[in-house]
């Protein structure tokens, strides 16, 4: 059974749902499709709304139903917002992050931050010193911004090659710095759409032992094609691929961990590599 560090929901529901039974349905769906432990990921919201969502998830952490909470935002770059509402994005401060952590009562295990934002490096360092995973992503930063974030304590890259530069974009970019000049793990959404087969092969060649397979699943995982929402953004799912209605950008996935593993096998990855990317390395990051 697999560990998923980045999952927003499934079975028609998000982990931000106000009904605990719907949250449990999303958890159960993934646990019935290969996931043994998961972080419940929340998208960008106003801080007050995010605190409400965090409080609703604390009992699930305390019971062991989830391994913790991942805040994917609101500390992201507008230019690389993906399926996050750009109007909700902001720079982080240690005081505000500490407030969110306090609300989480120990449940918040990971926060994604764009390292080029004001005070972001200080917050990354703060998270690292306080035994939390400082992930970097949804960044319009440079080659140097990426390396500064690693030096500050960044421990993971949120969905590598998504919400940042692509490998084709040049030799000295945010993505190439993290692939070639760092040693931190790289999340890969293993569905064949978020990172194409050729780029996955490059990542495997350079950093196969640093890949962490994640689903980044949204509510449509396990559900039919059709119309959905992420936060207050409209999404359409066609042939299992979720995209924003507004601009066609990828909007999470409909993956399960079982499906991610099947794709990895179809790409020719060994069972040893798959085990490392789905169990060994994510468990190490969570210290479980």
Image (cartoon, rainbow, N blue to C red):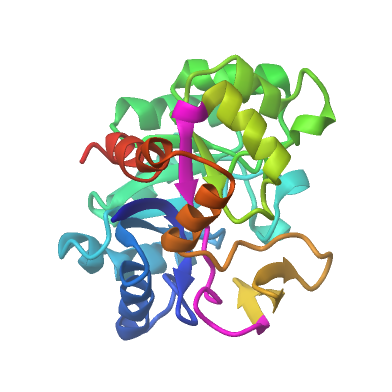
Give 184 or 232, whichever is nearer the viewer: 184
Q: Quadrant of the C terminus?
A: top left
Q: Does the stretch in magenta take in 213?
A: yes
| Quarter occupied by residue 177 | top right
Count of residue discs: 0
- In magenta, the rendered stretch is 208-227
Look at 38% across and 32% down and name the residue there.
Answer: 127
Residue 213 locus on image (x, y percent): 47, 46
Residue 250 locus on image (x, y percent): 71, 60
Q: Please indicate, yes or no, whether residue 158 appears anywhere in the rendered image.
A: no
In the image, residue 67 sits, relative to residue 199, either above or below, namely below
Q: Please indicate, yes or no, whether residue 256 appears anywhere in the rendered image.
A: yes
Look at 60% across and 56% down and name the residue there.
Answer: 191
Residue 129 locus on image (x, y percent): 32, 25
Q: Does the stretch in magenta take in 34?
A: no
Look at 66% across and 29% down and name the residue there.
Answer: 202
Look at 63% across and 45% down and name the residue there.
Answer: 76
Query: In the image, is 249 to the left or to the right of 251?
Result: right
Residue 261 locus on image (x, y percent): 46, 53
| Quarter occupied by residue 51 | bottom left
Query: In the image, is 270 to the left or to the right of 246?
Result: left
Query: In the image, is 168 to the left or to the right of 234?
Result: right
Q: Residue furthest left?
A: 63
| Quarter occupied by residue 15 | bottom left
């Amino acid at each position: 059974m697999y560990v998923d560090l980045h999952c927003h929901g499934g079975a028609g529901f998000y982990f931000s749902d106000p009904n605990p039974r719907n949250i449990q349905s999303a958890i159960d769906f993934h646990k019935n499709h290969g996931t043994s432990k998961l972080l419940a990921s929340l998208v960008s919201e106003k801080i007050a709304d995010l605190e409400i969502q965090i409080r609703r998830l604390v009992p699930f952490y305390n019971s062991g139903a989830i391994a913790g909470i991942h805040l994917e935002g609101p500390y992201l770059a507008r230019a690389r917002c993906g399926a996050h509402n750009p109007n909700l994005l902001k720079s982080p401060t240690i005081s505000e992050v500490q407030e969110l952590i306090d609300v989480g009562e120990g449940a918040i295990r990971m926060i994604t931050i764009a390292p080029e934002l004001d005070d972001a490096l200080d917050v990354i360092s703060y998270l690292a010193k306080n035994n939390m995973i400082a992930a970097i992503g949804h960044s319009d930063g440079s080659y140097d911004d990426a390396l500064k974030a690693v030096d500050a304590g960044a421990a993971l890259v949120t969905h590598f090659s998504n919400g940042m530069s692509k490998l084709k974009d040049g030799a000295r970019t945010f993505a190439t710095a993290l692939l070639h000049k760092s040693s931190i793990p790289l999340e890969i959404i293993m569905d064949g759409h978020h990172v194409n087969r050729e780029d996955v092969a490059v990542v495997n060649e350079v950093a196969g032992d640093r890949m962490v397979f994640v689903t980044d699943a949204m509510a449509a995982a396990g559900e039919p094609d059709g119309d959905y929402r992420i936060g207050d953004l409209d999404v359409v799912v066609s042939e299992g691929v979720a995209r924003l209605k507004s601009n066609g950008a990828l909007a999470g996935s409909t993956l399960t961990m079982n499906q991610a593993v099947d794709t990895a096998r179809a790409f020719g990855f060994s069972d040893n590599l798959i085990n490392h990317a789905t169990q060994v390395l994510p468990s190490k990051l969570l210290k479980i």
